[in-house]
Image (cartoon, helix red, strand yellow):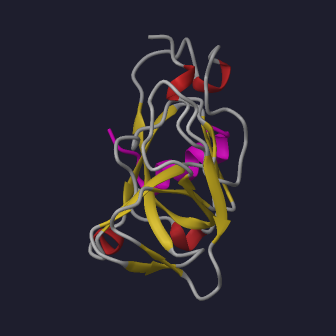
Amino acid sequence: MILSDKQILEEIEKGNILIEPFKPECLGSNSYDVHLGRYLATYKDRVLDAKSHNTIEHFEIPPEGFVLQTDTLYLGVIEEYTETHAHVPFLEGKSSTGRLGIDIHATAGKGDVGFCNTWTLEITATQPVRIYAGMPIGQLIYFLVQGEILNPYNAKLGAKYNERSIRPVESMMWKNKW
């Protein structure tokens, strides 16, 4: 079950959902609109290695915007800090973003109960497009969880994305044991 706007507000009141900053005008009938943060990043190397720590270079989106190119993976971040203590958050692109040819996540649209951070975006573009810090970029949707959570993300040993950041975070696949 997806939470309605009224239920999202009730869960915020209970402390089960936190969105900072929270703007009432961003609350939709069953979602909350999130905005592109001011930082993007790209990988330093053109060829990435899943077993290695692939480093990134951060840069700030200038006031005149930044043109995404089609042959590059950009890591972005949302402006909003979020916490989700009793629901499964899903981050989806807005239809207006998609209609500009922008995808905001390759595979990581679902969060875990207990995820407390900003969301890193995996941004690609089907054609060159200018983007701006603060533009609406996606929407959070919250799903009800059936049953007790034994291992929330923020308490999980070895959770790789718990460190609070206002900048995009690179892949930590290299920390996995395989």
Q: Position of residue 110 (x, y in %)?
A: 41, 38
Q: Residue 34 or 178: which is nearer the viewer?
A: 178
Name above or below for residue 158 compared with residue 54: above
- Residue 171 left/right relative to 95: right
- The residue at 65%/58% (across/down) is 58
User: Image point 53% across, 28% down: which residue?
Assistant: 52
Question: Which residue occupies 42% across, 56% down?
Answer: 73
Asked which quadrant contains residue 71, the reply is bottom left
State the image coordinates of residue 32 (x, y, percent, origin top left).
48, 60
Q: Residue at x 39, y 51 (%)?
A: 105
Above or below, comparing residue 53 to residue 97 in the picture: above
Q: Which quarter of the rendered picture does the N terminus lie within?
A: top left
Image quadrant containing the C terminus? top left
Q: Answer whether residue 5 is magenta in the image.
A: yes
Q: Image quarter for residue 80?
A: bottom right
Q: Is 88 one of the magenta-colored residues?
A: no
Q: In front: 115, or 39?
A: 39
Q: Main secondary structure of the magenta part?
A: helix
> x and y percent of residue 147 in the render?
43, 16
Question: From which residue to which does the magenta span run?
Answer: 1-16
Q: Nearer the viewer, residue 133 or 7?
A: 133
Q: Position of residue 12 (x, y in %)?
A: 62, 47
**How many numbered tags mark residues here?**
0
